[in-house]
Each structure stands twice: as structure tokens, then as C-alpha cells.
Image (cartoon, rainbow, N blue to C red):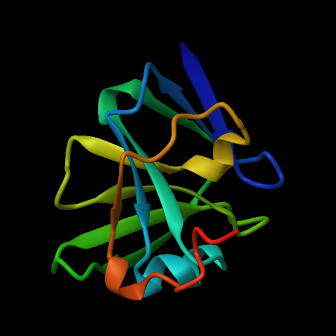
Amino acid sequence: MTRTASCSCGRLRVGCEGEPQRVSLCHCLACQKRTGSTYGIAAFFREQDVVTHGRSSLYVRQADSGFRVTFHFCPDCGSTVFWKPERLPDLTAVAAGAFADPTFPKPANAVHLESRHSWVGDL
């Protein structure tokens, strides 16, 4: 199975072969700022199962773990589509929402619960 994630304008795409190694929900403040939502959801695929198409701009930041994360976003529409976490060099993280697939696997874990908005999950 191949899934395709893309930015809002469709110029930056990522093809992912097979199932994600894991899907995680992150409540950290950096993910909240990056997504404009109360959390981010990352699908981690083996690097060799990911093929990118189109141009991307980069943003590098240090994670709470001390490792760097390199985000790839569309230079035209600004959507973050995928990122490379230095602490997981064999994996590529893809924004789960960029697949625009309501049948996509749900997260198996959540991290940075200390930053979770109190109302998340109440709706």
C-alpha cells in the first residue's frame, strides 16, 4: 500500500510505502505552534519507504530531548508535510493530517501530556 501526503497547494508531496512504524500524538508547545492546533500527530515511516516530490524549505529546531528536528514545508503555501528527527535517523515523520485520509491509523501513544489542553478529549 502506498499513501500520499501533500501540502495545501499540492506542490510538495510524500509517498509512503506500507504501514507507519508508529503514529504518535504530541501535545508539546512547539507542535501546537507548528500546527496552529492543540497538538500534532506524526506518522513515522522507515526512511527507505518515503519518496518526496517537489520543493521544500527547511526549518531546524532543537527538540526538548536536545536533538535537532528538520522540518520540510512547502515554500508556496507554508504547510509542514514531513520532518526528520535527529534522534530517530532511520525514520521520517509525516504529518498525519497531510494524508487527508479519515481511515488513517490512529495514534498509539501521546507525549508531552503536561502541555495538553484540559478540554482535549471532552468533545
Direction from residue 56 to residue 46 in the image, left or right: left
Q: Is residue 32 above or below residue 83?
A: below
The total number of labels drawn is 0
Q: Nearer the viewer, residue 85 or 33?
A: 33
Picture residue at 40% right of the left edge, 86% below the top? 115
Above or below for 56 versus 111? above
Location of residue 85 by image quarter: bottom left
Above or below for 72 versus 60: above
Front residue of 74/18: it is 18
Residue 78 % position (x, y) = 71, 69
Image location of residue 81, percent across then percent down: 59, 54
Look at 58% across and 74% down and name the residue there: 120
Left or right of 113? Residue 71 is right
Q: Please state the horizontal and vertical placement of residue 106, each as a whole percent of the image.
A: 51, 42
Q: What is the x, y in percent for residue 40?
A: 52, 66
Of all residues, the one furthest to the top in this rendering is 1
The quarter of the rendered structure image containing the N terminus is top right
Tell which of 54 and 119 is nearer to you: 119
> In the image, what residue occupies the spot 60% across and 34% down?
104
Q: Is residue 83 left or right of residue 1?
A: left
Q: Is residue 30 above or below residue 75?
A: below
Quarter-wise, where is residue 69 in the image?
bottom left
Is the C terminus in the top left, top right, bottom left or bottom right quadrant?
bottom right
Looking at the image, the residue that sits furthest to the right is 9
What residue sits 42% from the left and 24% below the top?
A: 19
Residue 25 placement, left or right of 74 = left
